[in-house]
Image: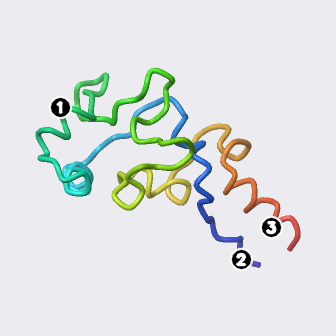
Amino acid sequence: MAKTPFICVKCGECCRWHGYVHLTADDIKRMADFLKISEKTFIESFTRLTENRQGLSLREKPSGECVFLEESVCGIYSARPGQCRDFPQKWTAKGAENACLGLILMKKLDEKR
């Protein structure tokens, strides 16, 4: 029997985890276009150099939340980075199954099958 497909319920839990949201050139262009700013302004305002100095990541608020998290909703959802788009189909984080409401719901639905 097939697993229940993941449906994001927009709880914002994944936007509160500490760590990098690695950005590609396409991510930067898409988000800058969405915000109607230049890529240079986007990079200066919303990114930081990763610790290994090999790429850019989204900045975080002092609380550790993503800079684009507005209450529990992503303020740039339609233009969000590929890393965010790929969660949890292509990657997940330790403990996500107990924090992400979409994963919790998916597990409950699978248990009822």
Q: Which residue position holds label 1?
A: 44
Is 91 drawn above or below residue 44 in the view shown? below
Residue at the limit of the structure toward the bottom, as seen here: 1
**Do residues under tags 2 and 1 come within 8 Å of each other at their CB atoms?**
no
Q: Which residue position holds label 2?
A: 2
Query: Which mark sits nearer the N-terminus, 1 or 3?
Result: 1
Residue appearing at x 86%, y 74% in the figure: 113
- In the rendered structure, the answer to whether residue 110 lies left or right of residue 3 reads right
**Do residues under tags 3 and 2 come within 8 Å of each other at their CB atoms?**
no
Residue appearing at x 22%, y 32% in the figure: 45
Considering the image in quadrants, where does the N terminus appear?
bottom right
Give neighbour class at mark 2: few <14, some 14-19, many 20+ (Cα, 10 Å): few
Depth check: give the residue in front, 98 or 47: 47
Q: Amino acid at mark 3?
A: Leu
Is 105 drawn above or below residue 83 in the view shown? below
Q: Position of residue 109 (x, y in %)?
A: 80, 67
Q: Amino acid at mark 2?
A: Ala
Q: Nearer the viewer, mark 3 or mark 2?
A: 3
Mark on residue 109?
A: 3
Give neighbour class at mark 3: few <14, some 14-19, many 20+ (Cα, 10 Å): few
The residues tagged by marks 2 and 1 sit, at their Cα atoms, a distance apart of: 45 Å
Q: Quadrant of residue 103?
A: bottom right
Q: Position of residue 31 (x, y in %)?
A: 26, 52
Q: Position of residue 88 (x, y in %)?
A: 56, 55
Residue appearing at x 27%, y 35% in the figure: 46
- In the rendered structure, the answer to whether residue 103 lies left or right of residue 82 reads right
Q: Nearer the viewer, mark 2 or mark 1?
A: 1
Query: Which mark sits nearer the N-terminus, 2 or 1?
Result: 2
